[in-house]
Image (cartoon, grey):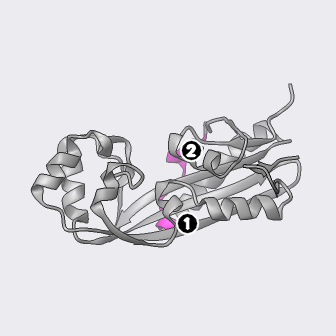
């Protein structure tokens, strides 16, 4: 069976949406990489290591394909804010972020075993929250949006109402730095601009 030309090694609907919006045609094949096997060092190195592991795991199974992979972490102070598992945890996270600046790091990779390409990097975006009232926090928690989102909010959803401003890539906060990914695809000859068409051209 012929391998897909371009693969997204992630089940994230947000990453899928971002690549579709960029005009790319691709196949989704989630990675089976064991994320627990990667010890935490500091956010930028950690997300790059996770992204490389995910991408290589899929890429080694599909050596003729180009594979895109990523991992995103939300950090505040010296800690990483994961996905809240309860209303109390979501409430605690939102109170901590209220009126403060936190960071979103995404490690991203482009991998092709056949072409010997293994490029990984990371992007950081600073996100500034407005000062949240208890009423706003309770409203947002009861939308159920926080519970599958790192940091307990979704900037592309109702959580946009909580964000005062950002410094850096918006798509990075959603889960994938699209500008950098497209730049790499173009540079490696994996895609090209198709004048007069709505999407990027793939060979």
The relative height of residue 165 versus residue 4 in the rendered view (above or below) is below
Q: Position of residue 29 (x, y in %)?
A: 66, 35
Q: How many marks?
A: 2
Give the quarter of the figure containing the N terminus. Answer: top right
Residue 20 in view of the camera: yes
Q: Position of residue 131 (x, y in %)?
A: 19, 68
Q: What stretch of residues is rendered in magenta? A: 33-44
Q: Residue furthest front?
A: 196
Q: Position of residue 78 (x, y in %)?
A: 34, 69
User: Residue at the location (75% across, 62% down)?
Assistant: 184
**Closer to the eye: label 2 or 1:** 2
Q: Secondary structure at mark 1?
A: helix
Residue 89 in view of the camera: no
Q: Which residue is mark 2?
A: 17
76 is within the stretch colored magenta? no
Q: Residue furthest top?
A: 1
CA neighbours of label 1 inside 10 A, class few (<14), some (14 to 19), many (20+): some
Q: Is residue 77 left or right of residue 116?
A: left
Query: Marks 1 and 2: in contact by CB < 8 Å?
Result: no
**Precedes in sequence: disc 2 or disc 1:** 2
Q: Secondary structure at mark 2?
A: helix
User: Residue at the location (77% across, 36% down)?
Assistant: 61
Identify the disc placed on residue 45.
1
């Amino acid at each position: 069976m012929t391998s897909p030309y371009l693969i997204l090694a992630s089940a994230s609907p947000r990453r899928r949406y971002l690549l579709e919006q960029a005009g790319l045609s691709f196949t989704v094949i989630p990675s089976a990489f064991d994320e627990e096997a990667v010890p935490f060092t500091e956010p930028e190195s950690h997300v790059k290591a996770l992204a490389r592991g995910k991408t290589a795991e899929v890429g080694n199974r599909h050596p003729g394909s180009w594979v895109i992979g990523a991992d995103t972490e939300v950090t505040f102070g010296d800690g990483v804010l994961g996905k809240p598992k309860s209303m109390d945890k979501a409430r605690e996270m939102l109170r901590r972020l209220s009126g403060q600046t936190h960071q979103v790091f995404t490690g991203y990779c482009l991998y092709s075993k056949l072409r010997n390409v293994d490029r990984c990097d990371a992007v950081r975006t600073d996100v500034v929250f407005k000062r949240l009232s208890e009423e706003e926090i309770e409203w947002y928690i009861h939308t159920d949006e926080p519970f599958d989102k790192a940091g307990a909010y979704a900037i592309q959803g109702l959580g946009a109402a909580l964000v005062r401003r950002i410094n850096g890539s918006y798509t990075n906060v959603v889960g994938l730095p699209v500008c950098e990914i497209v730049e790499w695809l173009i540079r490696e000859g994996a895609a090209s601009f198709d004048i007069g068409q709505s999407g990027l051209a793939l060979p």
